[in-house]
Amino acid sequence: MSKDKSLPSAPRASRRGFLTAAGGLAATALAPQARAGAGNPANQPPNVPEWTRTLGEGVAVRPYGKPSKFEKDVVRRDVEWLTASRESSVSFTPLHELEGIITPNGLCFERHHGGVADVDPADHRLMIHGLVDRPLLLSLDELKRYPRVNRIHFMECAANSGMEWRGAQLNGCQFTHGMIHCVQYTGVSLRTLLEEAGVKTNGKWLLVEGADSASMDRSLPIEKALDDCIIAYKMNGEALYPEQGYPMRLVVPGWQGNLWVKWLRRIKVGDQPWQTREETSKYTDLLPNGKARRFTWAMDAKSVITSPSPQAPIRHGKGFTIVSGLAWSGSGKVKRVDVSLDGGRNWWPARLDGPVLDKALTRFYYEFDWNGEPLLLQSRVQDESGYVQPSKAELRKVRGYNSIYHNNGIQTWHVQANGEVENVEVA
Amino acid sequence: MASRPGTCRQTVRSRMSRSPKLIIAAAALATLVASAALAGGPSEKTEAKIETKAPQRFNIGRAPSAEEIRGWDIDVRPDGQGLPVGKGSVAQGEKLFMDNCASCHGEFGEGAGRWPVLAGGKGSLTADNPVKTVGSYWPYASTLFDYVRHAMPFGSPQSLKVDEYYALVAYVLYLNDVVTDQNFELSNSNLSTIKMPNEAGFIMDDRATSEKAFWQKDPCMKNCIAPVKITGRATAVDVTPEDKDGKPRGVE
């Protein structure tokens, strides 16, 4: 799409190029062929395109494949003003460009506290000690000799959508909801290793600690550790990416991402929680009365429409339109998703497509014939426990505005007549 | 191969006392022989069952030595468990803080740029903009020691001596008026006796009761609320990062 100054742009003043360009979408909506025109007409019918008349690259020119060069903008992005340093910061998954439920490894959002540790797997060790009968020291190769499990789970930062507590701030579900990814993990059940080490009867808590510059440490109750946690060394079939804790990380299904310690090096069994910095000063949720909730581990049911969304406007004008979104719950499986076109007044059941798995992302669709009128798009999930995703107003009524974490309120996208989409609040 | 079960069991018992490793193998062998005796000979089915049965223990990996554990075992709990022997004073900590911490956290813990504020913020937790500091928010002094020793100074963690970490923690407590004497010396014997101002400020996760309204309801489908209006827009705040080419992509 090219910016055509001769065509009218949206009647909304903005100092930002992002919005100026988006305003140009009005032209696209009027002339659906406009974007296709950005290519080379010599490649289009009736002509035979250049890639048909020449040989392409041979095998292994790119021994590790990459996306098409035309998808170069499908990347993680960050919000520079969020943090003081690049090493203790976050980048976001481009949810608006993805489909299905699996996040490609290179697009999984990052959150580091001391940069990405560059770990040589030959030197990495996992130590299990404390209240156990047989302390263990394992290399990666030794870890891989234990029986394996494969599980698909979402991993969400507790601060996902945290910038939106006080109101709509960011135009793009990459930024409002992109601190989440979902991959298939391969690893060893934590229970297997704890049984190998032999937890003593007074062993009630685990300290889990990373090997990066922040040496992240968190306390994990033994019940969860024995239930469904995994020490993973593969994601989507290949070795963990360095940004995701290579060579091994903890997987704590359904619970806040901060517990999923990357570059995992140590597990200590004790009889009390450690009250580490992350679980006291950081991942606690401040309520309006000045008290703070702690140990808020589970991620509540949440959903978001990924397209259309501010970074994925409707370019085709009125007509058949696909609403695509993601829903998930830290308490189990997604039971249903409803979609509203009028800001939550009326709802229609969405169609779940693809696998609906425990503590995993679930893809939903709502297809309809758009008449070109403005919409206030929302999605609302209910999980198998019966929990219903609350509106932002309902959530704020209980938690106020200062909780930072666990913002799972219903998101509203305003679809304008020209197909442009913006992040809004409604009442 | 046919041997009498009785003979075999005796062998098992004599080995058990010597090597726990052999218990499982021997027990499995005993089972095999017993089954074989019952069936009148080893069958394929019986053998397959035994081969796929996972052992109770895998005996993969080794025990870390006491010295190996000591090198990594640096965590500290509120009850003082884990504190290394050492000490450091507020005055010693002040110098260390200026050299190692002040460039990010400010000379008085007031914070520089977007780096964390360490001191102040008392009484702000119910305000519009809470300032969560060691003094206003952190419930335990042990957490400060655990964190600073794990992760600070930023970029060169675990580079200071134990006594220096005690001194730094003493200074941060002093900046927060938790200790008020410049000559105060923090040590492994007194750290766990320090009470932090906001220790009582924390409650356990009560979402299951306090947010019960979000559970077990039939979601409303028609005319659920009065027609809504837009009350806020992200563009009013206007902090979305630019796209590289200044254009949103979008669905065709």
Image (cartoon, coloured by chain):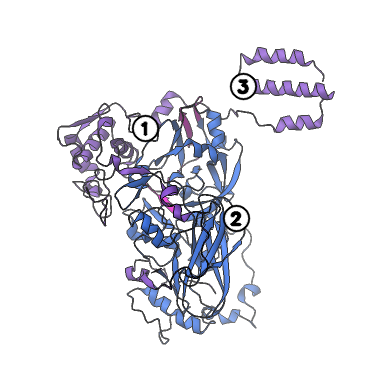
Q: Secondary structure at mark 2?
A: loop
| Mark 2 and mark 3: Cα distance apart in space | 43 Å
* x then y, percent, for residue B167: 22, 34
Q: Are marks 2 and 3 on the same chain?
A: no
Q: Secondary structure at mark 3?
A: helix
- Residue tagged by mark 3? B21
Q: Is residue A306 visible?
A: yes
* x then y, percent, for residue B201: 30, 43
Q: Residues within 10 Å of mark 2 (few under 14, many from 20)?
A: some
Say which chain is blue: A
Q: Is residue B131 magenta?
A: no
Quadrant where the C terminus of chain B lies? bottom right
| Mark 3 and mark 1: Cα distance apart in space | 33 Å
Classified by dominant secondary structure, the portion drawn in magenta counts as loop
- Residue tagged by mark 1? B74
Q: Amino acid at mark 2?
A: Val
Q: Amino acid at mark 3?
A: Lys
Say which chain is purple: B
